[in-house]
Amino acid sequence: MQPQSCISLSRDKLNQLPEHITVPGYPVEKVTAGIVHVGVGGFHRSHEAMYVDAIMEKTGDLSWGICGVGLREGDRRMQDILAAQDYLYTLIEKHGSGEHKARVIGAMTDFLMASDDPARVIDQMAAKQTKIVSLTITEGGYNFDPTTGNFIANNDDVQFDLANPATPKTVFGFLTAALKQRKAAGQTPFTIMSCDNIQHNGDVLKKMLLSFIRLTDVTFANWVEQNVCFPNSMVDRITPATVDADREKLQEMGLSDGWPVVCEPFHQWIIEDLFSDSRPHWEQVGAQFVPHVAPYEKLKLRMLNAGHSVLGLVGSVAGLDTIHGAMAEPKLRELLSAFMSSEVMPTLDAVDGIDVEEYKGVLLSRFANPYIKDALSRICLESSAKIPVFLLPTIKDNLSANGSVQLSALTLAAWCYYSDKQASEDGKPLQIQDAMADALHQAASGTAEDPLAFLKLESVFGELAQDRVFSQAYLPIIKGLYNGEPVLDIATSLLSEHVASCD
Ligand code: CS2
């Protein structure tokens, strides 16, 4: 039950909210949509939408609001909840000191479910006032084959879109239809901005979209190639899934919000300054526009995201539940720190203005924030799309430079154990939430007969199983795990071997 003094979030109640909840200083009803965003999840709401809210607050230019688009049926709940509260929601920043700061974000103007009315989504993207179409569709949403980097065309939805261009289902179909309208109207195209954790995210998106368009219209693909900008970007803010306790906490603060978003105080956005049309001056609210994003992306994906996967996969097998819980386990914390220093840092490029040691220290304290309560299950979901982006490039670089791959091998072995047993070492069930769940389970379950069976899943690992150096690192680890040696003991012996080899 809602406490009596608790107010339900809506535009007309904004001026009644308690003082400790920050509300937009601009008139939210006057915001218009200059951005269409596909994939309105927690991360979009804690990151890009927060920057949009901040820039509108700072400049009073209200033409940069966001019209959300949901492509999956699973997005409908978000649409229903946001629509019921005039597209407002609360962002709760959880500081390491225990302080919670709540702020209502007024950046969203609307939310369209693509399957309800595909033409409306196309029109919204094609409308002259739309300057940017941005995406957070997860690493798996880009439809690329992780081993070849090519577009996967033999997929039902892609085939549907090729046959039904006016009523598409995929992001590629919508972008194509909207860009065609824009071109036919003789208008400047919108910028297409990926905000997903993929190295060269803009370039990858461009390549995927052009491959899709080329299947039916080479001339139009050439026009898109020459006229549409796809900036690369590095995005960062740890955003765990919202749980009921977050809603209750907000109610105690006097506000009822069906789906607030929680996050850490830290946020970073580094964007390549490459836009087809105008853009918000996000640099005035903390974003950085740079000519080359690649070194920043590489740093973040390999240190933070892969670091998360190390804690997520090894920690889950060890029976732990959360990132901060994993950080409180000294063996895991040490494993993570050694992984970053000895396997990731040697593969990084110099990054302007960033001291990588310091960056690592900040990461370790971000991960240790006990109020974030980031579930390892969130980190482990869709690992088949994450590991090829976050970790395999590091392994590849180390293999070609004679670098160390042992701690990466331990992470892959833990993933194999997880996928095979679907339980932690102490018997707690672990669910595989992954588009490739069956293939992962099937490959991993061959391990007892062939210890390299998991790595032979070529659609994820490419030719890694055939690399002698890697398999020499992996084999004793996987055998140890399957012989009942605890994963954290294996980590400890790898770390002591590592220290001995550095002496
Ligand atoms: C996480 C990311 O999904 C994951 O595995 O590593 O969601 C991570 O929390 C964000 O990229 C932080 O910016």
Image (tube, rainbow, N blue to C red):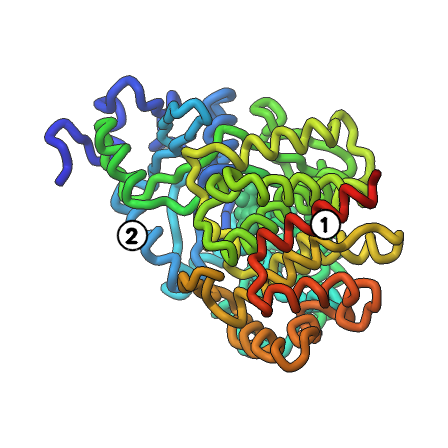
Instruction: Decide: few, some or many residues near mark 1? Use Cα within 10 Å; few <14, some 14-19, many ≥20.
Output: many
The picture places residue 488, in percent across and down from the top left corner, at: 58, 52
Of 422 and 135, nearer the camera is: 422
Residue 242 placement: quadrant: top left
- Residue at the right extreme, as displayed: 401
Mark 2 to mark 1: distance in Å?
34 Å
Please state, as top left, top right, bottom left or bottom right, where the C terminus lies in the image.
Answer: top right
Q: Secondary structure at mark 1?
A: loop
Q: Is residue 281 above or below residue 341?
A: above
Find residue 200 and name its label: 1
Residue 361 placement: quadrant: top right
- Residue at the left extreme, as displayed: 4
Instruction: Decide: few, some or many residues near mark 2? Use Cα within 10 Å; few <14, some 14-19, many ≥20.
Output: few
Q: Earlier in the sequence, mark 2 or mark 1?
A: 2
Of 402 and 203, nearer the camera is: 402
Which residue is rendered at x = 56% and y = 79% of the image? Answer: 442
Which residue is rendered at x = 82% and y = 34% of the image? Answer: 350
The picture places residue 465, in percent across and down from the top left corner, at: 76, 71
Task: Identify the amino acid type marked 1.
Answer: His
In this rendering, the label closer to the viewer, 2 or 1: 1
Q: Is mark 2 within 8 Å of ligand 1?
A: no
Which residue is rendered at x = 78% and y = 33% of the image? Answer: 351
Residue 374 placement: quadrant: top left
Task: Identify the amino acid type marked 2.
Answer: Asp
Q: What residue would you read off at disc 2?
A: 80
